[in-house]
């Protein structure tokens, strides 16, 4: 697989003790006499085959020999007795938290006075009020201390983290038997940044994408093995179940609630804790998407934890921090089968020890390939804020805004959204496309049922060229022939996802589980979303048939259709921030250069009309169809969501709106979709997935097509209805 200059630096493959240089496509791999890659460190022993060596290696970790000691890492001191107690004391003494406790105590006193629980006429009123206030402050202090203790990571024991590294590496490298791959160039750059951050006592904030629980495990292993201070990781308290929760907390987990509600004290404790971590220069990690992506593509940013981080800097409590976007890609994600059942409407099971143990034991027997972790070039958060403020101050707005007022909520929200989408764009920029994603994309963008081996290789080769032309990266495997790489990818996917029919003129491959395979297709869609939107917009003319002239579309009409589609999928995809006109023109010119479309121009060179090129028609529209098939499951899902809205319309003659739970409306839409699919009215079963339907409903709500109300009480589910009767009548 050919490589460009950006991929010239070799990778490092981490497998516990073993670190191997993995060359780029055109670099010869280091070979031993028997033709195998030379490991810089030997692999770990197994108890069954080498019990004495196994016990010796365990003792090396526990006692801390060589790099295993984890004594010479880059970053602020961690893993010493009393670390968590020190952090808790810093949090509890924070001015922000003490002020909030006093404020809440005063608010409660005011309520008690209003309700007559404190008598103004009592001669000892002032004394009793002061005593009552002291009791309230003490109670709130104890609650805050409990919250902090439950939340805090416990970096108290170095022997624990040595043993944990050994244990987790043993488990992970059995499942991902080809190890964890990182770029040597990116690692060296990250170490230089970490050394500078340590000198300035600044935190590195790692912001990875989130597709699997393995994400944070692999991040900790990389930092440990390469001598970087382990980050404190934000984790949902759903993971805090017996044994496992305690283990994760001692390995870096900072547990927070899934929803804060109106709990002002808890919100302030979280802010004070994050302030303390960043003020101390401790590394920090959170997932910008919030939860794990069940669909394989990046999710829109969740701004909860990011807002706390941003507030730390905007308030002046923290001077600066370093942002490091991280992409983690997999040959195969452990949880995809579970994701499919969730997307088909089966409620997610709460994490528990029994499922963890049974699931973990089954994973050990799998051969899931490798994990690729890529680090974007880190950047200063303070520098980003200053740059954005300077840029926004020069842009005229209808409403006068002082962009230098850091307390202005308009300013804060603008910075927060820009930060979130900047991080997602950086993650996409360094993401590596794995062989399984290449195979899944090709199989799900075919016209026919299956594809022969030769054609599969040809289409994968074409896809690799297109990815590189779009500035994307493809995982490299030394000088292995592409056919071998594809064979390896098919083995990892397994026969449950991709089937093969032998006994024909050539082996023919077909998608067995299209729904699960769509997870891997969606790992490439961000690279081609602009082309897919243009081709889908053009399809409204192509579908009419007839001669080429009939199928051409005026450029303005194309622009209108692309605007509609891009607005419709605003919650699904991450677009370039250069604006529709610039993106559309660049995309159209790129498709013309690839000979997919032809362009007509006026005498001034302005684009007036586009259509399919003669070469694309002669090739059977295979490249044009590829782009259409990428986006079509999402178009069908939006259509399905729109059709399902008829179920929200009140029966004729009934006044008023009918309110139903959003979850029930989505369940009904899924049932309708499954019925239409099996009856042949829906082409893609992926269109019934819950996440895309949920995004469609949210988009309809934003457009005023439906109403959605949400209670502040998290125990009360959201409800939706069609628009008010007057609004419906006004749109007819």
Image (tube, rainbow, N blue to C red):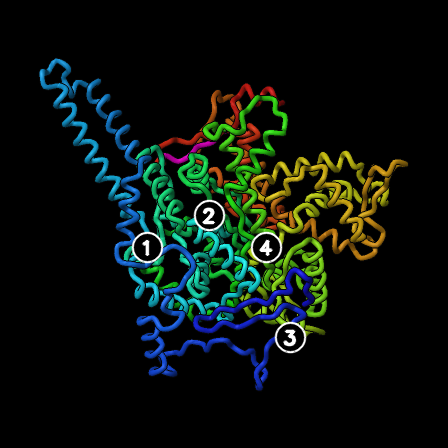
Is 300 situated left or right of 710 in this image?
Answer: right
Q: Quadrant of residue 726?
A: top right
Q: What residue sits right under mark 1 in the picture? A: 249
User: Local crowd at mark 1 within 10 Å, few (<14), some, or many (≥20)?
Assistant: many
Q: CA distance from mark 2 to mark 3?
A: 49 Å
User: Local crowd at mark 3 within 10 Å, few (<14), some, or many (≥20)?
Assistant: few
- Mark 1 vs mark 2: give the one in front: 1
Q: Which residue: 63% across, 29% down? A: 395
Q: CA distance from mark 3 to mark 1?
A: 42 Å
As drawn, the residue found furthest toward the bottom would be: 33
Q: What residue sits right under mark 2 in the picture? A: 345
Q: Nearer the viewer, residue 129 or 463?
A: 129
Placement of the N terminus among the 4 image quadrants: bottom right
- Disc number for residue 430: 4
Query: Which comes before the other along the chain, label 3 or label 1?
Result: 3
x, y (%) of residue 587? 73, 45
Find numbered disc 4 in the image and state the secondary structure of the residue it sits on. Answer: helix
Find numbered disc 3 in the image and state the secondary structure of the residue it sits on. Answer: loop
As drawn, the residue found furthest toward the top would be: 121
Q: Specify the segment rendered in magenta.
A: 716-721
Q: In the rendered image of this protein, does residue 418 appear above or below residue 631?
A: above
Query: Which comes before the other along the chain, label 2 or label 3?
Result: 3
Is 711 situated left or right of 140 in this image?
Answer: right
x, y (%) of residue 690? 50, 45
Query: Which comes before the other along the chain, label 1 or label 2?
Result: 1
Q: What residue sits right under mark 3 in the picture? A: 28
Is 584 situated left or right of 370 in this image?
Answer: right
Q: Are marks 1 and 2 in contact (CB under 8 Å)?
A: no
x, y (%) of residue 546? 84, 44
x, y (%) of residue 662? 46, 36
Q: In the rendered image of this protein, does residue 637 appear above or below residue 77?
A: above
């Amino acid at each position: 697989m050919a490589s460009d200059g950006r991929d010239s630096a070799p990778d490092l493959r981490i497998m516990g003790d073993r670190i191997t240089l993995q060359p780029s496509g055109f670099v010869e791999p280091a070979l031993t006499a028997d033709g195998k890659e030379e490991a810089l460190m030997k692999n770990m022993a197994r108890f069954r085959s080498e019990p004495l060596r196994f016990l010796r290696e365990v003792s090396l970790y526990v006692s801390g020999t060589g790099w295993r000691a984890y004594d010479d890492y880059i970053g602020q001191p961690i893993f010493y007795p009393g670390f968590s107690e020190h952090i808790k004391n810093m949090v509890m003494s924070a001015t922000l938290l003490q002020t909030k406790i006093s404020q809440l105590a005063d608010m409660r006193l005011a309520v008690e006075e209003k309700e007559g629980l404190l008598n103004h006429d009592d001669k000892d009123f002032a004394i009793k009020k002061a005593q009552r206030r002291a009791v309230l402050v003490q109670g709130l202090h104890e609650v805050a201390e409990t919250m902090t203790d439950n939340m805090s990571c416990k970096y108290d024991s170095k022997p624990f983290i040595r043993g944990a590294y050994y244990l987790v590496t043993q488990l992970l490298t059995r499942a991902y038997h080809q190890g964890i791959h990182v770029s040597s160039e990116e690692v060296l750059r990250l170490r230089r940044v970490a050394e500078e951050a340590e000198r300035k006592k600044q935190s590195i904030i790692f912001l990875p994408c989130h597709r699997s629980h393995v994400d944070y495990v692999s991040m900790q292993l990389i930092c440990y093995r390469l001598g970087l201070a382990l980050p404190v990781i934000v984790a949902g308290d759903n993971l805090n179940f017996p044994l496992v929760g305690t283990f994760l907390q001692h390995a870096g987990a900072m547990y927070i609630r899934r929803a804060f509600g109106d709990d002002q004290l808890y919100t302030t404790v979280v802010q004070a804790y994050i302030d303390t971590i960043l003020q101390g220069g401790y590394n920090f990690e959170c997932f910008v998407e919030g939860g794990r992506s069940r669909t394989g593509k990046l999710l829109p940013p969740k701004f909860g934890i990011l807002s706390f981080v941003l507030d730390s800097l905007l308030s002046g409590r923290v001077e600066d921090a370093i942002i490091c976007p991280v992409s983690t890609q997999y040959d195969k994600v452990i949880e995809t089968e579970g994701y499919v059942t969730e997307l088909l409407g089966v409620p997610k099971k709460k994490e528990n020890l029994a499922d963890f143990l049974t699931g973990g034991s089954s994973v050990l027997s799998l051969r899931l390939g490798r994990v690729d972790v890529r680090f974007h070039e880190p950047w200063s958060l303070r520098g980003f804020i200053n740059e954005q403020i300077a840029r926004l101050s020069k842009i005229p707005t209808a409403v006068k805004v002082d962009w230098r007022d850091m307390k202005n909520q308009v300013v804060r929200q603008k910075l927060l959204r820009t930060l979130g989408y900047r991080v997602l764009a950086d993650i996409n920029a360094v993401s590596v496309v794995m062989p399984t994603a290449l195979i899944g994309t090709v199989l799900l963008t075919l016209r026919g049922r299956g594809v022969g081996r030769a054609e599969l290789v040809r289409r994968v080769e074409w896809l690799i060229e297109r990815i590189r032309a779009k500035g994307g990266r493809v995982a490299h495997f030394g000088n292995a022939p592409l056919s071998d790489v594809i064979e390896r990818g098919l083995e990892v996917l397994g026969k449950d996802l991709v089937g093969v029919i032998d006994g024909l003129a050539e082996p023919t491959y077909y998608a067995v589980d299209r729904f699960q395979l769509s997870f891997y297709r969606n790992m490439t869609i961000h690279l081609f979303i602009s082309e897919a939107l243009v081709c889908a917009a053009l399809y409204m003319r192509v579908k009419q048939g007839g001669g080429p002239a009939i199928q051409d579309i005026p450029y303005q009409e194309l622009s209108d259709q692309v605007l509609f589609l891009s607005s419709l999928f605003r919650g699904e995809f991450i677009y370039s921030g250069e604006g529709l006109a610039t993106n559309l023109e660049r995309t159209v010119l790129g498709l013309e250069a690839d000979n997919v479309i032809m362009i007509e121009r006026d005498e001034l060179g302005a684009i007036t009309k586009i259509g399919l090129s003669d070469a694309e028609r002669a090739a059977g529209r295979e490249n044009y169809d590829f782009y259409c098939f990428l986006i079509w499951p999402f178009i069908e899902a939006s259509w399905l969501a729109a059709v399902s809205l008829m179920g929200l319309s009140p029966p004729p003659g009934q006044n008023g709106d009918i309110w139903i739970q959003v979850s029930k409306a989505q369940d009904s839409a899924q049932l309708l979709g499954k019925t239409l699919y099996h009856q042949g009215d829906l082409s893609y079963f992926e269109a019934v997935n819950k996440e895309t339907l949920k995004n469609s409903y949210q988009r309809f709500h934003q457009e005023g097509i439906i109403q959605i109300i949400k209670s502040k009480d998290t125990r009360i589910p959201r409800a939706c209805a069609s628009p008010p009767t007057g609004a419906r009548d006004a749109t007819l």
